[in-house]
Image (cartoon, helix red, strand yellow):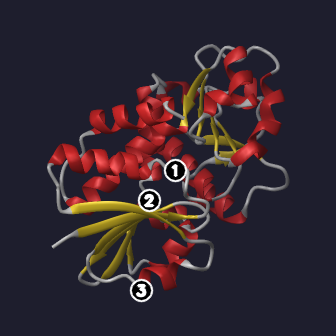
Amino acid sequence: MVNRAAVLGKPVAHSLSPVLHQAAYAELGLTDWTYERFEVGQGELASFVGERDETWRGFSVTMPAKEDAYALATTRAPVAERTGAVNTLVRTPGGWAGDNTDVYGVQQALLDAGFDPATLQDGVPVILGSGATARSALAALTDLGATRAAFVVRDQVRPATQAQAAADGVTLCGVDVAAAPVVINTVPGDAADSYATSWDSPVRSGQVVLDVRYAADRTPLGSAVTAAGAHLVGGIEMLVHQAAAQVVLMTGHDAPVAVMQAAGRAAMAAR
């Protein structure tokens, strides 16, 4: 019997999740697994998933449906409960199990880039944005040892994000972006580039900036970050690791991370 999976979101045509998952299936010899993409907007997830038959084994969920996925899940992993967001749905006999592999993806992308968690003892990490992805970034930083964090937002930090910080014992404070040991951009699209001026001056030595957008190095923000002396990490690195965790959850097989990284980086180079 065929086993089917897909990424759901809107827009989703740009998603590299199919490239990563299909590369994993090929390496693992899972010839009975397929992975597709479907446009599913906010409020449409429950009806879409409800119309799928039992050949559908799992879904990767991206914006704007992560909170809808949280509501749909019959059971949720602790990290999903903690962040109020689900990016992974896996079929079980009792319904859909929800998980949030974005947290793992952020952690591994930072560690791969050489980020030293010890710098969180004297430095305050900065997160651009305060939505569902920002809550995953906050959880990742907290698990790496952060007890303080700063959010840069247009208005106010979302209540759900403030509540998560309080529950995790994280103090929210202000900080100069240039002094942060790590900055994570969770703002989608071109809106993030309005923050480029925060890097008009040199930054703390060793600063790592993770931009969840795939082509971070091709943006005004990425150019400013690099010019200021920070180490820029593109969102493809986070995507690889969160997808690897999804492969494990959906198929039960260890993910071939190196193969997935090579496939993701090659796809980015071809764009």
113 to the left or right of 126:
left
The residues tagged by marks 3 and 1 sit, at their Cα atoms, a distance apart of: 33 Å
The image position of residue 144, as x and y in percent, is 46, 38
Residue at horizontal 49%, vertical 32%?
Answer: 270
Q: Which residue is mark 2?
A: 100
- Which residue corresponds to mark 3? 51
The percent position of residue 122, horizontal first and vertical second, equals 61, 26
Q: Is residue 265 visible?
A: yes
The answer to whether mark 2 and mark 1 are in CB contact below 8 A is: yes
Of tags 3 and 1, the one toward the viewer is 3
What's the residue type where badge 2 is placed?
Asn
Position of 56 with respect to 131 (left or right) is left
Report which residue position mark 1 lands on.
Answer: 139
Q: Amino acid at mark 1?
A: Ala
Label 2 Cα crowd, 10 Å radius (few <14 / some 14-19 / many 20+) = many
Secondary structure of the residue carrying numbered label 3: loop
